[in-house]
Image (cartoon, grey):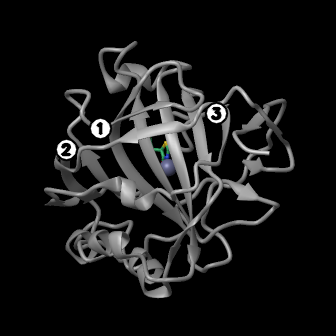
Amino acid sequence: HPLWQNSVYDPVLKPLKISYDPTTCLHIWNNGYSFLVEFDDSADRSIIVGGPLENQYRLKQFHFHWGAINEWGSEHTVDCKFYPAELHLVHWNAVAYPTFEEAVMEGDGLAVIGVFLKLGAHHEGLQTLVDALPAIKHKDTVIEFDVFDPSCLIPQCPDYWTYAGSLTTPPLTESVTWIIKKQPIEVDENQLEAFRMLLFTSDGEEEKRMVDNFRPLQPLMNRTVRSSFQ
Ligand SMILES: COc1ccc(C[C@H]2SC(=S)NC2=O)c(OC)c1
Ligand SMILES: [Zn+2]
């Protein structure tokens, strides 16, 4: 969604508190739409709280969306500008709902932190993920991933936008409290190219490069985007 022009500063918004346990990391896999790193969400070990949220939410997985070229790739824009990629850290409300699947269907079920990736300096923390990508080139390939702290992918600057939105792929349920960080992280060209080497297709099928796996921009309709900063 188009952020910034349509946002209003809300002084009541609190800082977002992020506490991830790197050992809750399970595996990294190619699901044919993106690559995702999944976490053990059987207890409150990797959680976020505060910000616009009433409860604490458990980290389930993170994944990315990116373009074939650096001109586009993100699912949100700032000042009508696309970033070459966008990270989504998906959390669910385990206080209110017994399972992730149920939370997906509820208005306060999910909280997704969005982080823009911009072309710039090499990102050390991301490189750990990039090094694993050749092993999950094809759809439905997975490798074990023992320890990873996703906080290294979240900018220090506390500023964010927030709005009530939806999943960006089917079932598109309106269950997401979006928390989009204002500050992007910088990654280098080789790291973005590594994303573009992944395939949508399974081993043995005609190869289709995994690029442009983002939902096109949608109208804001009558939604209010609030900012935590002036
Ligand atoms: C059935 O439940 C689903 C389905 C799809 C996704 C992934 C989508 S939603 C998002 S944000 N970005 C994406 O690519 C889910 O993620 C929480 C949950
Ligand atoms: Zn996503």
> Which comes before the other along the chain, label 2 or label 1?
2
Residue 37 placement (x, y as % from top left) = 29, 53
Give the Cα distance between marks 2 and 3.
27 Å
Count neighbours of disc 1 (C-alpha within 10 A) and say few if under 14, some if 14 to 19, many if 20 or more: many
Which secondary structure, mark 2? helix
Q: Which residue is mark 1?
A: 46
Amino acid type of the residue that numbered disc 2 sits on in the rendered structure: Thr
Q: Which residue is mark 2?
A: 24
Residue 193 placement (x, y as % from top left) = 45, 83
88 relative to 137 in the view: left or right: right
Labels 2 & 1 near each other (Cβ < 8 A): yes
Amino acid type of the residue that numbered disc 1 sits on in the rendered structure: Ser
**Residue at point 19% right, 44% down?**
24
Q: Which residue is mark 3?
A: 165
Which secondary structure, mark 1? loop
Residue 137 placement (x, y as % from top left) = 28, 72
> Which comes before the other along the chain, label 1 or label 3?
1
Give the Cα distance between marks 2 and 1.
7 Å
Residue 10 placement (x, y as % from top left) = 76, 31
Q: Is residue 189 above or below residue 59?
A: below
Q: Is residue 39 above or below residue 156?
A: above
Q: Nearer the viewer, residue 205 or 115?
A: 115
Q: Is residue 159 above or below residue 198?
A: above
**Residue at point 64% right, 33% down?**
165
- Tell me the mark number nearer the camera, choosing from 1 and 3: 1
